[in-house]
Amino acid sequence: MLLIPIPLLSQGTYIDENALQPAQVNTYWNWGDVHTADLQLYQLDGIRERNLTSEQRAEFFRTEFSKLGLAASIQNYSFSTSKGTVSGNNVYAVMSSPRAAGTEAMVISASWLSRAGHGALNLRGTSTVLSLAAFFKDYSLWAKDIIFIISDDYLHGMHAWLNAYHGTIPSNLHTDPLEHTSGVIWTALNIDYSSHSFSHLGVFHEGLNGRLPNQDLINSFRLISHYTGGVPMTVYDHLEPSDSVDRLPEQSAFPSWVPLFIQQSPQLQQYGYRMRNVVRHIGYQARGMCSGVHGLMHQFRIDAITLFAVPADGPHGFHALGRIVESTLRTMNNLLERLHASFFFYILTSPGTFMKIGMFLPSAILVSVAMLFKGLGEWVTAGWVCEITQASSKGNETEKPSPTKGTWRNRRRPLVSALIVVVITHVLGVLVFNLVCSRWFAEYPSFLAPAIFAVVSVIPPMLLPLLSANGPEAAPTSMLLKASNLCLASTVISIMSLLNFSLAAMLAITMGVPLATSYTSSSTVTSRLRYAGYCMLGWGWLVLVPGEVESAIWNWEVLGVWFAPFICIVYAPLVMQAAIVCLQGL
Amino acid sequence: MRRTPVWIFLACLCTPSFALYPGEIYREDLRIQPLRDGRVSTTFSFVTVLEGAVPRNPMALGQVDESQHYALFPLTLGQILREHAITELHLTLNAGRWNYDNWGHPHEAGVGTGAELWAWMGASEITTVDERWSGLRNALSGLFCASLGSLDSRRTLSPTVAFPLSGSTPTFAPHELRHASLPSENVCTENLTPFLKLLPCKSHAGLASLLNPQKVFDADWHGMGIHVIWKEDTGVELKLTLQAVFNPVRTSTGKRRDWNLQLLFDRSIERSCPVASSSSITVILPEEKDYQIIPEYPAHVDGLAIYDLSSSSNFTIPSNIAMSWPSEHSFQYPLPPLTPVTPISVKRTIHGTTQTRGILSVSVTNNSPQEISAGYLEMVPALLTLWMHTLKVEINSQIRSDLLSGLKYHPPSPQSNDRLSPLDVASCPHNSTKDHARNFHRGQQSFSEIHRTSTRCDERLGSTRGRVFPAPSIVSRYPSEL
């Protein structure tokens, strides 16, 4: 896995869909349109200063869209979660393309809050959307409808809008059907521009539950950004080592304690940069989180990315951004069918290079296969027992009984008690998950989290005596449990590696070695310590990372990210089974 | 002396007089209406009447047909009509989505996207209706360069309630209807050129000289129609229509809604069509009086300004009609809430995230103060299956199944790979919105069945273009008729 960032394993990106023709058009966005954007920004600054409510803001945006002659409307929504109700107002406008039936659409969106955090408002992003709306409607070259969305807050606004648009309203979302609709949405660009000006455009592409957009979208955007706008593209918001020479030290890929000769080696810098990209990618994808508002769209098979204007003193602003967005949309406007030619499974190691699934998948699959073999080996071993003959043991009492001198014979392998343990741990996982998602947990997390941790750690040892101990004629339950545990974990990792590689990689790291090395120790203290270690590995997050727990629960309740249930119902029980292996036979 | 008859003959040939063409009348008309969203709707209609003519009796298809001598009526179309014994024919080719909310009802009905063809034919034992329908489709697709040949049995059905005979009902044979539509058909210049060839003056003179393809096909909406109707008292009437909705706000530099013929079409009328018995331009004047129109019309008749091209009393050729709003700096779009223009608004949406399943939801809003009863026809291609047991009728989230009556549903039969056509007749209480929702299942198509149009394959597996459903039809019945 450490090899993944090596430049040799990546290959250059390329455009696979011939219809795209990126950066081949003359753009019409000019300084007059930049002036419109500046005027919009002036009005938005006023809104910020007057501290308008969400409703007043939405009303303002709707009036602005209506002044352009677009069909605009406001969507009120509210999510009920265990922590209370979240509500907001989205504004959207549909521009019907001339001469087209309106069966396909593209989306330009901006969320009110920027991903830059600390309550930063996406004022320039929203004014770009407003001025692009005024600009696009003056051209008849659009073959698809264009939907402009200004979503409230950061993530949940867009999530509510998308669900209402696709008619998949979850039970905890309250919203009315949309007043204006259009066709199937193919492409979406989300604009996040909160700073005064920018030097690079950062692309964020990870979606919910590990989904990625088609790589052709990112590749065309890179070419357009470079050739049409003259703005270099970066992956995420950190810069390449060549770009960040004169930047602040925090942009460096290495921490400050690393020796200077390593920091200055170009190969290692390149490795460090790519490593950083891969780590960020895995960080988003493994947790099923989206890296921006765009990520909510992938579940509806919309290819979407967020364009993040990397804050800098210059030199780019509305002029470059408008031209790039115009050109990207016109490229996507060419499509007769959805993007399908390029890759859906990839890791962008740098803006111009990526790894195919065939290059990175083996790292997780190899671990998984090793676990499978280990589990099967355990199963075979459990079926045989070495009987040391009386004669040989009498002769050398001091020597350890050697298997070579004994005779091997078959023994029964009763799986029932092992399976009971498996089922009990998973049922326990379901119970914990329901408890964690309940309102009580949201109200008293500091009290309930350690309590739950204590209960789930104590219950298995208490239940153990209830299980029938196998006689000498049968294999010990611990071996069978370990065999089934390893096989189950191996299956989970292999399946996960196709759905969400990063999660599979994390599972391979956290479960691979620990599960394979679980054994029943003869010493009680060692067993207890090992058991405690596994408990920490399986459930320790309840106590150690309360912030992550909270965000994972919020993601599950509002956005439907299945990372939280997966950890509770699949991952933690698997680790607990390994923990029980350590206790068995005491 | 011997040459006198020749001279008379030549003199007759050179005299442009419709007395030369007994029994044939040609008239043309252009309607221009400024719309409230700054757009301008233009409707050309070119009508040729064959006086006293009768559609061919399908019983006589085996015999030699009477000779066809037309002077104004297009021979190419006439031959097709006679060959297949067509009593009534309607073909529309449209591009764009008609915005009923802002534009109101179109002057010429039939504005669904793509191609739509329907014909009434007399039944006959010599050649069946379906054989002639197939021949008609192929002949018309050749004539108009459109993919009408692909409107095969999978897309054809016979919804007689929604598409009744527009003219008189002939007595010589029982009549049958065939209707098919192809929403993915693109309309472009290759369809306009054969359309213009059917006109007696082509695009050289008269109103048709305004039809500049570069401008017409840049309009926000455009469509053409060919309608052949038989009326017992007049004869066979051919009406060629062309509608376009222009957007002067988009094309002008100052974002103004001012328009004139030169600006809209980039052409002017140099001379009138000599064979036209009447030729006029009608401007439907807006209700607000802040506009200015040049030339000044003599008198307004119910808010209309009528310019007669054939008499030079108030219209000189070449000339231009211009309408402007001098008090406006740039056009201000009306802000919501807008009062709806039509009594009923219908919104049809397809919900769903997967390729195989979805929900078809139709929302009908009655904007008028009284209850309206309307028929709703949905024709669905055979590869889609609608599940009627999932049909739900709601008003304000309350189930109101009693509002729906006369539900008819023809499922596709597996042998003929046929089509289905549910017909709902529903009544809608005043000022309310009604939602129908129906689940559908998009069947798997085997590769050999994939429908291929002349330009591209639009329903390729996995491509998920949005265009799955042809336009529905609404048949309104107002309270007075009930």
Image (tube, helix red, strand yellow):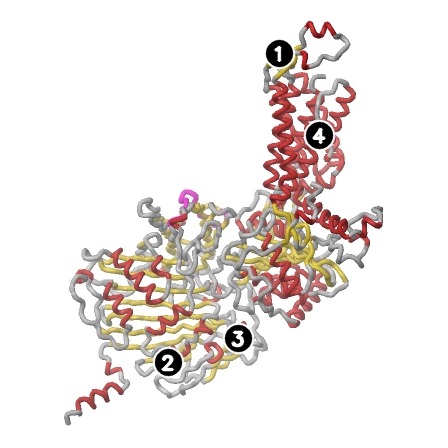
Disc 4: which chain? A
Q: Which residue is denoted by mark 4 in the rendering?
A: A514
Residues indicated by labels 2 and 3 sit on the same polypeptide chain: yes
Residue A111 position in % (x across, y down)? 65, 55
* Distance Cα–Cα, label 4 vs label 2: 87 Å
State the residue lying farthest toward the bottom.
B1
Whether pointer 4 and pointer 2 mark residues with C-beta atoms closer than 8 Å, the reply is: no
Q: Which residue is denoted by mark 1 in the rendering?
A: A473
* Distance Cα–Cα, label 4 vs label 1: 29 Å
Are there few (<14), some (14-19), or many (20+) residues within 10 Å of tag 4?
Answer: some
Type of amino acid at the residue the image marks with label 3: Arg
Residues indicated by labels 4 and 1 sit on the same polypeptide chain: yes
Viewer-proximal residue, B458 or A2? A2
Secondary structure beneath disc 2?
Answer: loop
Type of amino acid at the residue the image marks with label 4: Pro
Does the stretch in magenta take in B393? yes
Q: Is residue B462 above or below residue A227?
A: above
Q: Which residue is denoted by mark 3 in the rendering?
A: B257
Residue A584 position in % (x across, y down)? 69, 19
Residue B301 position in % (x across, y down)? 40, 79
**Closer to the eye: label 4 or 2:** 4
Viewer-proximal residue, A130 or B147? B147
| Magenta residues, start to end | B382-397
Lower sequence index among marks 2 and 3: 2
Q: Which residue is denoted by mark 2 in the rendering?
A: B204
Residues indicated by labels 3 and 1 sit on the same polypeptide chain: no
Q: Quadrant of the N terminus of chain A?
A: top right
Whether pointer 2 and pointer 1 mark residues with C-beta atoms closer than 8 Å, the reply is: no
Picture disc at residue B320: none
Whether pointer 2 and pointer 3 mark residues with C-beta atoms closer than 8 Å, the reply is: no
